């Protein structure tokens, strides 16, 4: 494994500088450092991965990169394209999460927790969809599909962790929570109350989700490689 410290430091430094630029209105700083965030965390993934580079996971990160660049250049004028990029990433991540689901018997307590979680998230989604915002009304189906995919990602990730509390599923669940917070605070800032602190939380959660994404996938691959090695030995 190569030294991953420089890429991780660059990712952290770029993320912090973006937040500083956002807080103080330094647009030039954001234009310079925000494009570094995803490439830095991707390079960190390449240096720490336990196996071959996964093309689908690469698509996940670079789809988020495209969404970030669209957001940086066009801001609110291209939200549908941003959501489409996010949707691609969410669907791929859902596929990974479903493939990794533990085979243990589901307990009644876990079912109750998931039902409550689904109910709360569905309530939040339809509250946002019924805000009578022009952009939501025009693209209702896109917002609906995007919201459902986000709920599915959070639910499956939570289910996996409830079934088997491993480091892999902790990273997965943390990633899903960060994505949820990021999107929720973005929606609040965009359609309800526009406050700087809300936008800062959105960005912080978004950048943190990238780290947990890589941690999840690396621990996932390490586990798969270990199982494959054990199978070969037998």
Image (cartoon, helix red, strand yellow):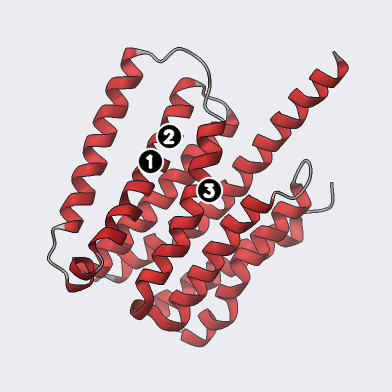
One can see residue 25 in this view: no
Q: Quadrant of residue 9?
A: bottom right
Q: What residue does disc 2 label?
A: 156
Q: What residue does disc 1 label?
A: 152
Mark closest to the chain's N terminus, 1 or 3: 3
Q: What residue does disc 3 label?
A: 92
Residue at point 51%, 79% (across, down):
30
- Give the answer, above or below, for where 62 lies relative to 181: below
Direction from residue 64 to residue 117 in the image, left or right: left
Mark 3 neighbour density, 10 Å: few (under 14) some (14–19) many (20 or more): some
Q: CA distance from mark 1 to mark 2?
A: 6 Å
Residue at point 18%, 67% (across, down):
137
One can see residue 64 in this view: yes
Mark closest to the chain's N terminus, 2 or 3: 3
Mark 2 neighbour density, 10 Å: few (under 14) some (14–19) many (20 or more): many
Residues at circles 1 and 3 in contact by the CB criterion of under 8 Å: no
Residues at circles 1 and 2 in contact by the CB criterion of under 8 Å: yes
Callout 1: SS: helix
């Amino acid at each position: 494994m190569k030294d991953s410290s420089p890429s991780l430091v660059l990712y952290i430094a770029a993320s912090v500088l973006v937040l500083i630029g956002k807080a103080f209105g330094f647009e030039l700083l954001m234009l310079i450092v925000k494009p570094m965030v995803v490439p830095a965390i991707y390079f960190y993934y390449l240096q720490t991965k336990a196996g071959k580079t996964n093309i689908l996971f690469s698509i996940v990160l670079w789809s988020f990169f495209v969404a970030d660049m669209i957001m940086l250049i066009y801001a609110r004028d291209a939200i549908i394209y941003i959501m489409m990029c996010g949707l691609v990433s969410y669907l791929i991540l859902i596929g990974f999460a479903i493939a990794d689901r533990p085979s243990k018997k589901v307990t009644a307590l876990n079912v109750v927790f998931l039902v409550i979680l689904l109910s709360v998230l569905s309530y939040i989604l339809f509250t946002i969809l019924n805000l009578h915002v022009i952009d939501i009304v025009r693209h209702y189906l896109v917002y609906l599909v995007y919201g459902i995919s986000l709920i599915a990602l959070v639910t499956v990730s939570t289910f996996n962790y409830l079934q088997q509390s491993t480091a892999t599923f902790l990273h997965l669940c943390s990633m899903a929570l960060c994505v949820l917070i990021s999107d929720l605070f973005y929606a609040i800032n965009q359609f309800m109350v526009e406050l700087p602190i809300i936008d800062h939380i959105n960005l912080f959660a978004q950048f943190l989700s990238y780290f947990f994404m890589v941690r999840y996938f690396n621990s996932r691959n390490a586990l798969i490689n270990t199982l494959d090695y054990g199978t070969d030995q037998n």
